[in-house]
Amino acid sequence: AKEIFDVVIRMFADRRDPAKVEEWLLNAGQSGWTPEQAAFESVVLLYAEADPVKAEEWLTRAQQTEYRLPDVCFTAVVQVFLRMGSAAKANEWLSWMLAEGRSPSVTLLTGVVSLHIEAGNVPRAEAWLGQVAGRSTVPVEDLRKSLFDAAMRANDVPCAERQLLELLEPCAERTLEVANALIEAGDPARAKELFEHYFDRNGPVVPALCSGLLATCAATGDAAGAERAARVLTVASGSLSSAQAALVQQALGYDARASELLAELGASHPEPGVASPGSPKQVSTPQPQRLRPPSASAEERTVAHPAESGRPASGRAKHGSGTTVGPSPRNGTRTATTASAKSAARRNPTAGGTNSLRRPPGGK
């Protein structure tokens, strides 16, 4: 009778003998019986400690029964794949947990984010980071910085920009890194928005960022922004260079106002080779210099921010949305959003249908 199988399986489970538990589970299946749920829980948890492949196999078999195994069984399988460094398998089972309405622990989620970052899979890492960030009590600053670095290595500038905008504290070096990439891609307007976002959040005044803001204001025809940047840059650096003075002239239109401002700031007029008043288009917009780590005294000068000179906060919209919440397995990884999709996607390691517990070929 079924009760006999249940008793024997419990006995071997108490002895922590996964091979014997598996043997009697298969015997029960071949006799036409489906053992109690505790038998499936035991074989999954015991094999998670000894044989990850077997643990996954039995978790899959349990999914084909009427039982709903507790989250601890899924957690055990995901944890073992995280320890093995198998990002694909961890991703697969975490996706199943979400598809079934389960709530993976923060430890599992941060683990799979780190694993995808190490593997260079930026889209997957960003998707799972969204799951972690959805839990407001969980700090993700370090993960965002790691993902930012991975995105820049992968030349995924939109992802890096999204992470930058979500950082709790403004970061001068990362702001300049993304801005440089945007300028090189021919998008000074977005680079200008990043500089403005940095100063709107009261980031420390760094001459390289002020210079970058001046250059992008000149490139986009923002005269008021260029004037603010020039004033702050003069205080931060002591004076404007000839190239920076040329940018002021370009932004202000080569009229008397430009000359008045340069005179007020004590800046020399650009040399003829730098800017030609009769040919504004000849003035090139230099890219902001790569940021060198500034000294504390240079970075924290008490000067007015560009954001404090009358310009309202930019309120910039985020460019790009990244991967949406709820990591959608890609590249062949199965996904399940409905009962029918779930049933079709599940692997069936047994040879005898969805409810069979027949011994697989080569099984013990």
Image (tube, grey):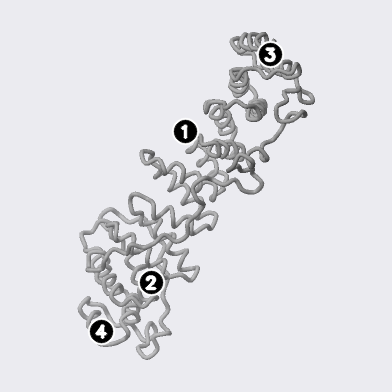
Q: Quadrant of the N terminus?
A: top right
Q: Is residue 56 left or right of residue 315?
A: right
Task: Find out whether the residues at labels 1 and 3 contact each other: C-beta distance under 8 Å.
Answer: no
Mark 2 secondary-structure assignment: helix
Q: Compared with residue 350, is residue 36 higher up or lower down, i.e. above or below?
A: above
Q: Position of residue 110 (x, y in %)?
A: 47, 38
Q: Which of disc 1 and disc 2 is earlier in sequence?
A: 1
Instruction: Work out how far the residue at label 1 is from the one at label 3, CA to CA, in angstroms.
Output: 31 Å
Residue type, numbered disc 4: Ser
Q: Is residue 190 above or below residue 154?
A: below
**Residue indicated by mark 1:** 105
Which numbered mark, 1 or 4, is in the foreground of this view? 1
> In the figure, residue 16 lies in which quadrant?
top right
Q: CA distance from mark 3 to mark 4?
A: 90 Å
Which numbered mark, 2 or 1, is in the foreground of this view? Answer: 1
Looking at the figure, which quarter contains the C terminus?
top right
Q: Residues within 10 Å of mark 1 (few under 14, many from 20)?
A: few
Q: Amino acid at mark 3?
A: Lys
Nearer the camera: disc 3 or disc 4: 3
* Residue of label 3: 20
